[in-house]
Image (cartoon, grey):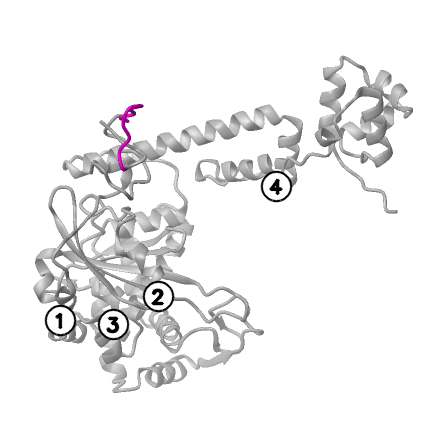
Amino acid sequence: MVERKIFAGPRVRRIRMGLGLTQTMMAQALDISPSYLNLIERNQRPLTVQLLLKLSAVYKVDLDELQGEQGGSAGQLREVFADPLLAGEIPGDQELIELAEAAPNAANGMIRLYRAYREQAARLSDLAELLSRDGRVADIAGPRLPLDEVHDRLQSRANCFLRIEDAAEALHERLSPGDDMLAALKAWLKGEHGIAVRLLPVRAMPGLRRRYDRHSMRLFLSERLSPFDQLREIATEVSLLAMREEIAAELDALALSTPEANRIARFELARYASHALLMPYGAYLSAAQRMHYDIDGLGARFGVSYEQAATRLTCLQRPGAAGIPFFLMEIDTAGHRLRKAGAQGFPQARFGGGCPKLNIHAAFAQPGQILVDAAQMPDSMGFLTISRTIDGPQADFGERVRRTALLLGCDIAHRDEVIYGKALGAADVLIGPACRLCERQGCLARAEPPVTRPLGLDEMAAGLSVFDFQ
């Protein structure tokens, strides 16, 4: 039988010191040398099954205490050190395990402090949002990941980049794609830069969407992508080559703080440029107004997906030629908000987007169906919301499809200009910005108490919500 080896030096040391023994005294009782015990305590030698039994017999030690895993604490410590506050101070997995084992009380104290810090950070964020709703700006800065900085910057400004729009319209006119944009983009890449486009099977690109090989001058695309996504990837490559200066100028205007944030934003701007190239501003705005912003109709007209057509509607804010100011939010099945954008910036203060009663959450129960609601905020402000699921790249057999949901919204005043306004019912859906900022009484969907009101716990009566407040 193979002997199981366990490295548990810090736990052996804690037992020895708890009993007030020296290494020599414990080594004699266990019938090993003091130097060997020293190596065990420093995790340079394992605890064998025989030693485990000896410890249990001599010192009445619970074997579970010696064999227990500290993976839970180590995993929680990994979350602590993943915070941007500790960027550059990320220890390895073995170091985290050693910390959890050698000083479990200190590790648990660190975890509790981190959780308290995160709770206070959330409360400060809530406070900043409340102040912004009153027109006051609260500069509550905190450490952020580069991706968070990029998202915050893009969400707070209008989703319209005029330099890119002008360059994309000019390039589209030069391409003269007619009814075959794919062929026009491939011809431009080949003619201008000698780049050929090739589709590769999943086994050749198991984890990539797109890869450009400078040596062979080929742009490889994964067969997992839908034809719409393949077209967008090619348009992205064309945009990076043809609109380099315009993208760089818009990137400089964002004034981001780190090279990593600039790299992420450059990709976002290239994706924006690809949409502007596939759906030129003037033609798209004209078609959107004629079709009353029918997303499926616009997708069919321009040969793009529902997601691409919906995203483009948030970009129509050119001065003197503006469309309805739509905003957009995308979430996954766990409720994570993956992206937010708006024609005039995402309306965080007015709309929030964190209410569980929004139809974007119900969309997962009806994949591919468009859900339309008139949503009313506590201050009686109303929004037209249009939600639908979208699927990611083709999944392998046995692999779950990546499915997210997209919410497109605008002020309810535009309901008669939008085809989806015809589907609205008689009653509005009463929502709030987020549970922690909402004071609606008796809400069945409430997940958290509001930070602005004290809890109203009463042993004699219980309300409909588990978080009743005064």
Q: CA distance from mark 3 to mark 4?
A: 46 Å
The correct choice, above or below, for 350 with respect to 178 in the image is above
Q: CA distance from mark 2 to mark 1?
A: 24 Å
Near mark 4 (Cα within 10 A), the count class, few <14, some 14-19 or many ≥20, is few
Relative to 157, is 32 on the left or the right? Answer: right
Instruction: Indicate which label's residue lies in the foreground, 2 or 1.
Output: 2
Near mark 1 (Cα within 10 A), the count class, few <14, some 14-19 or many ≥20, is some
The residue under label 3 is 168
The residue under label 4 is 92
* Residue found 32% across the figure and 35% down from its top: 466
Q: Which mark is residue 292?
A: 1
Where disc 1 sits, the SS reads loop
Near mark 3 (Cα within 10 A), the count class, few <14, some 14-19 or many ≥20, is many
Name the residue type under label 1: His
* Residue found 66% across the figure and 39% down from its top: 94
Name the residue type under label 4: Gly
Residue 320 seen in the current view: no
Magenta part of the protein: which range? 455-464
Mark nearer the N terminus (4 vs 2): 4
The residue under label 2 is 367
